[in-house]
Image (cartoon, rainbow, N blue to C red):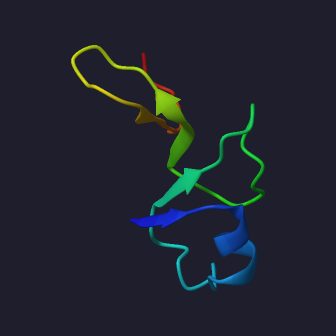
């Protein structure tokens, strides 16, 4: 898994070489700004979770819906 943001994807990484790896993409906009694939989206770094003091990152996993069920 590669942790990334838009600037790293655009200027630092050779995404063709990373095509088989999952991307954990950090972007705090209302919707992800990247045109590239990603599996996890870190959408906030100021979340609040009961039992944890201070701010936490908030993430979701993106996956394709199965045609079953």
Residue 22 image position (x, y, % from top left): 45, 61
User: In the visual, does 2 lie left or right of 6?
Assistant: left
Figure quadrant of residue 29 = top right
Residue appearing at x 65%, y 83% in the figure: 12
The residue closer to the viewer here, 64 or 46, is 46
Residue appearing at x 55%, y 74% in the figure: 19
| Residue furthest left as drawn | 51
Q: Quadrant of the C terminus?
A: top left
Total numbered labels? 0
User: In the visual, does 53 lie left or right of 42?
Assistant: left
The residue closer to the viewer here, 52 or 14, is 52
Residue appearing at x 51%, y 27% in the figure: 67
**Above or below — where is 27 with respect to 66?**
below
Q: Is residue 66 visible?
A: no
**Above or below — where is 37 with respect to 54?**
below
The residue closer to the viewer here, 20 or 69, is 20
Residue 2 image position (x, y, % from top left): 45, 68
Residue 44 image position (x, y, % from top left): 56, 35
Q: Quadrant of the N terminus?
A: bottom left
Residue 16 image position (x, y, % from top left): 63, 82
Q: Is residue 44 visible?
A: yes
Figure quadrant of residue 35 = bottom right
């Amino acid at each position: 898994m590669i942790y990334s943001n838009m600037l790293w994807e655009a200027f630092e990484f050779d995404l063709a070489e990373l095509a088989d790896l999952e991307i954990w993409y950090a972007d705090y906009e209302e919707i992800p700004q990247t045109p590239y694939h990603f599996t996890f989206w870190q959408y906030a770094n100021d979340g609040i979770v009961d039992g944890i003091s201070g701010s936490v990152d908030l993430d979701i996993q993106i996956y394709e819906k199965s045609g079953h069920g």
